[in-house]
Amino acid sequence: SNLCNSCFNCVCDLVKPVFSRICIEGNIASGKTTCLEYFSKTSNIEVLTEPVSKWRNVQGHNPLALMYQDPARWGLTLQTYVQLTMLDRHLSTVAAPVRMMERSLYSAKYIFVENLYRSGKMPEVDFAVLSEWFEWIIKNIAIPVDLIVYLQTSPQTCYERLKRRCREEERVIPIEYLESIHNLYEDWLIKQTSFKVPAPVLVIPADHDLQKMLQQYEENREKILTTGRA
Ligand SMILES: Nc1ncnc2c1ncn2[C@@H]1O[C@H](COP(=O)(O)OP(=O)(O)O)[C@@H](O)[C@H]1O
Ligand SMILES: O=c1ccn([C@H]2C[C@H](O)[C@@H](COP(=O)(O)O)O2)c(=O)[nH]1
């Protein structure tokens, strides 16, 4: 057990882990990266931002842009790659007692794949293949999460922040898209009526200005950073 207690990466159930794995969840442009940037200034925290740069450039191709241009054709392509890069993030060697990660393998499937499928933009066969991949992964590989921090926003707030951020691929996103993502998040993490929630959820209202957000992060610092720790 000495070995387990001193090893951040051990996933055995015999001893309580001495580390915690936190996922920051929320709609597009809800403020996840800003939240991670804030906590990255704390020592002993490892911060893993979403692999968006990979989704915009895989061997010279941009599956994120392709998906927004033609979701029915490229949704499977993007989401297969998102699933791979998320799995890689979850399984990478833990480097500090607290790990904060932007989104997760779970939200890729329960929010984004689900949204493509429900909106009629993903063919049934693509959805079936992705679902079998996902089910195989979570059945055969431990993907432990100790806490989900949900940045809860209104779709309107995200729409305004998204427009200001000006990411080229996202110019085509209408407010209705953000409303669908919002509703899927609410069903999953607040109502808890859609899919299994893999960890306790801490909800932080995130429509506020930056100053108020930082104040809330300070108020919740202990709760967030001590979750899952022995
Ligand atoms: N509380 C806030 N108030 C106003 N603008 C914000 C706030 N938090 C983040 N932003 C801005 O909104 C945009 C999206 O924030 P970001 O942290 O990148 O969101 P996400 O990572 O969830 O997509 C960025 O331009 C960021 O500077
Ligand atoms: O499974 C996924 C996850 C993310 N996306 C899209 C949504 C956004 O355009 C970007 C991520 O940006 P954030 O600002 O960090 O939310 O990637 C997706 O299509 N599928």
Image (tube, grey):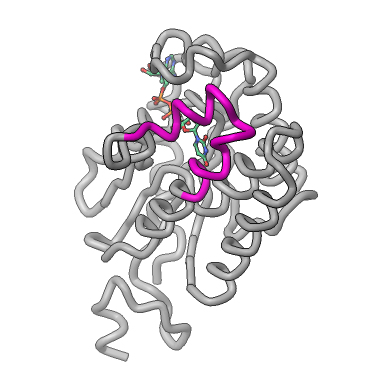
Q: Is residue 1 left or right of residue 140?
A: left
Stretch in magenta: 61-80
Residue 111 vs residue 14, the one in the foreground: 111
Classify 194 as above or below 161.
below
Quadrant where the C terminus is found in the figure: bottom left
Please tell me whether residue 69 belongs to the stretch shown in magenta: yes
* Image quadrant in which you'd find residue 89: bottom left
Q: Is residue 83 left or right of residue 89?
A: right
Q: Main secondary structure of the magenta part?
A: helix
Q: Residue at x 30, y 62 (%)?
A: 92
Q: Residue at x 45, y 31 (%)?
A: 64
Which image quadrant shows ligand 1? top left
Q: Residue 58: x, y in percent?
A: 32, 41
Q: Residue 82: x, y in percent?
A: 46, 46
Q: Residue at x 22, y 54 (%)?
A: 44
Classify 212 as above or below 198.
above
Q: Is residue 208 left or right of residue 35?
A: right
Classify 14 as above or below 132.
below
Please tell me whether residue 70 belongs to the stretch shown in magenta: yes
Residue 67 vs residue 90, the one in the foreground: 67
